[in-house]
Image: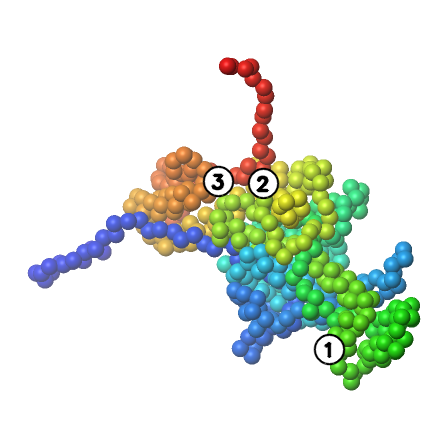
């Protein structure tokens, strides 16, 4: 109520001259779910507790370092001296995926550790899949800041379990929260396409289902990165040291050049696997003296650096958002710490990736001469939708929706009258004008870019007023990427 003046004197009243403004919400805050070395903060466990970090060093302090992924050393095929196969129960992708994230422009993110490295069980379906318990994804239901969800360890599950988890990710984003998108990896995405029933992209499209596809984007193929350095690989990465000793000894027996030197090296080889041995010294000696040992470690490093691309894409989205804006498509952008995609995609192969009949577009990662490895796709999985075909459109609308929603909360329980309507319209129009100036909305003038309608007889009926409902209609002309540029040439008559 207005102040009642009873005592003579001078009174000052201040009135707001400008409408309230809305603040844009963050658009590039991924949430990573997976396994970590530890999960301790302030001497308390933070398993299944979303934790915000801003750097890899901060991750190390809270969650520890990389897993010690082991490989079985086997006899080679087709004349090759050896081959290595990863021990599945020791394989975890989260840590190296985070390295890719920060290498591609990533900054703030959330980590949800669903457990520590267990080299006897590996990645368990029950721990990651929210359909079976309340872990993993469900811990994000109370967090409003994350705008992307990434679970790189999903592709380490059995195929059916991976698809079940990815469906749960899409359901979380598109049904439970509606304020974030899922970045998905293709199961076995390091393999080339066969265009048959066992084709990895076809299997992915069948496994992901048809619900809420506008809230997800998928990328193919996997990438060969450089995030795992040579210095991290040693004999501890080999699960069967006896086979290693045998193969190294055999390689020396084929070299009769210096029997005295070979005898000394053999003594070092015999120390492999011994508990009372200086493993670092033996490793350095063998690395210098035995070429086969070095070749085995290089092969292990190459396999460790083959990673699903979702973490790198979270970094690319973050970099593009911070440098240009969320309305810019995260495509035609180089990828950092990536040597090449595991599959060389041609224009013919990408045609089916980008324009399938079912609309489930899978974005390609390609290598071009003179350009390097670039992201060459910008679509959601809902490629047949004119509204939500492009990832940048979906994410721009999410940003605008959430920003206006938060700003409008201050008007809850305000009088539902024309004065409030004018204030709300002014607040939203100011915000949308700023977005138009930043290039997020299309139009020569703001009136062409958006409209905000509110009022009795416009968006509300008298019954709405009695029910306490304030209805606001916002229409947007969101910018869309020029995905296909067509330049037409023709000859003309000589004019002079």
Mark closest to the chain's N terminus, 1 or 2: 1
* Residue marked by disc 1: 280
As rendered, which of 280 and 382 lies closer to the eye?
A: 280
Q: Which mark is residue 389?
A: 2
Which of discs 3 and 1 lies nearer the camera? The answer is 1
Q: CA distance from mark 1 to mark 2?
A: 53 Å
Q: Look at the image and tell me whether residue 193 can be seen.
A: yes
Residue sticking out furthest to the left = 8
* Residue density around tag 1, few if under 14, some if 14–19, many if 20 or more, within 10 Å: few
Is there a contact, CB below 8 Å, between mark 3 and mark 1? no
Comparing marks 1 and 2, which lies closer to the viewer?
1
Give me the residue at 58% from left, 40% from top.
Answer: 389
Badge 2 density bin: few <14, some 14–19, many ≥20, Cα 10 Å: many
x, y percent for residue 170: 62, 52
In the picture, the disc for residue 202 is none
* Residue at image point 88% right, 73% down: 258
Q: Name the spot of residue 327 as percent of width and height, x first.
A: 50, 45
| Label located before the other in sequence (3 or 2) | 2
**Disc 3 packing (10 Å; few <14; some 14–19; many ≥20):** many
The secondary element bearing badge 2 is classed as loop
Residue 23 percent across, percent down from the top left: 40, 53
Does the image show residue 461? no
According to the picture, the residue beneath numbered tag 3 turns out to be 478
Q: Nearer the viewer, residue 161 or 282?
A: 282
Q: Whole-Å distance between the Cαs marked 3 and 1?
A: 58 Å
Q: Earlier in the sequence, mark 3 or mark 1?
A: 1
As drawn, 186 above or below 437: below
Residue pictured at 79% horizontal, 64% vertical: 295
412 relative to 292 in the view: left or right: left
- Disc 3, SS: loop
Q: Secondary structure at mark 1?
A: helix
- 290 or 350, which lies in front? 290
């Amino acid at each position: 109520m207005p102040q009642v003046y009873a005592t003579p004197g001078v009174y000052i009243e201040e009135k707001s001259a400008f409408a309230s403004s809305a603040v844009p919400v963050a658009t590039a805050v991924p949430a990573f779910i997976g396994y970590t070395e530890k999960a301790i903060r302030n001497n308390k466990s933070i398993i299944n507790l979303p934790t915000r970090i801003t750097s890899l060093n901060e991750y190390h302090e809270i969650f520890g370092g990389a897993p010690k992924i082991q490989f079985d050393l086997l006899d080679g095929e087709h004349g090759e001296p050896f081959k290595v196969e990863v021990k599945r129960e020791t394989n975890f992708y989260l840590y190296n995926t985070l390295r890719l994230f920060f290498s591609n422009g990533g900054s703030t993110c959330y980590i949800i550790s669903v457990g520590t490295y267990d080299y006897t069980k590996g990645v368990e379906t029950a721990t990651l899949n929210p359909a079976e318990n309340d872990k993993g994804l469900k811990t994000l239901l109370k967090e409003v800041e994350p705008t992307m969800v990434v679970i790189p360890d999903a592709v380490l599950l059995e195929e059916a379990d991976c698809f079940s988890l990815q469906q749960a990710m899409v359901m979380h984003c598109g049904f439970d929260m509606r304020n974030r998108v899922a970045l998905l990896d293709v199961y076995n995405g390091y393999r080339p396409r066969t265009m048959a029933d066992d084709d990895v992209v076809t299997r992915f499209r069948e496994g992901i289902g048809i619900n809420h596809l506008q809230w997800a984007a998928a990328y193919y193929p996997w990438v060969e990165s450089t995030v795992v350095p040579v210095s991290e690989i040693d004999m501890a990465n080999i699960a069967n040291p006896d086979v290693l000793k045998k193969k190294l000894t055999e390689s020396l027996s084929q070299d009769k050049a210096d029997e005295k030197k070979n005898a000394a090296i053999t003594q070092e080889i015999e120390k492999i696997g011994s508990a009372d041995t200086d493993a670092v010294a033996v490793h350095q000696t063998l690395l210098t003296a035995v070429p086969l040992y070095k070749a085995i470690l290089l092969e292990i490093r190459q396999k460790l650096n083959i990673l699903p691309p979702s973490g790198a894409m979270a970094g690319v989205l973050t970099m593009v958002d911070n440098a240009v804006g969320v309305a810019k498509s995260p495509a035609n952008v180089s990828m950092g710490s990536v040597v090449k995609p595991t599959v060389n995609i041609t224009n013919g192969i990408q045609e089916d990736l980008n324009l399938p009949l079912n609309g489930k577009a899978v974005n390609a990662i390609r290598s071009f001469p003179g350009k390097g490895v670039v992201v060459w796709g910008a679509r959601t999985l809902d490629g047949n939708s004119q509204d939500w075909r492009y990832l940048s459109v979906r994410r721009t609308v999410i940003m605008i929706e959430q920003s206006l929603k938060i700003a409008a909360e201050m008007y809850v329980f305000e009088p539902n009258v024309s004065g409030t309507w004018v204030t709300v319209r002014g607040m939203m129009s100011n915000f949308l004008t700023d977005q138009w100036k930043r290039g997020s909305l299309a139009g020569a003038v703001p009136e062409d870019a958006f409209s905000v309608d509110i009022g009795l007889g416009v968006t509300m009926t008298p019954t709405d007023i009695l029910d306490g409902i304030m209805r606001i209609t916002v229409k947007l002309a969101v910018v869309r990427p020029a995905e296909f540029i067509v330049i037409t040439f023709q000859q003309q008559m000589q004019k002079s």
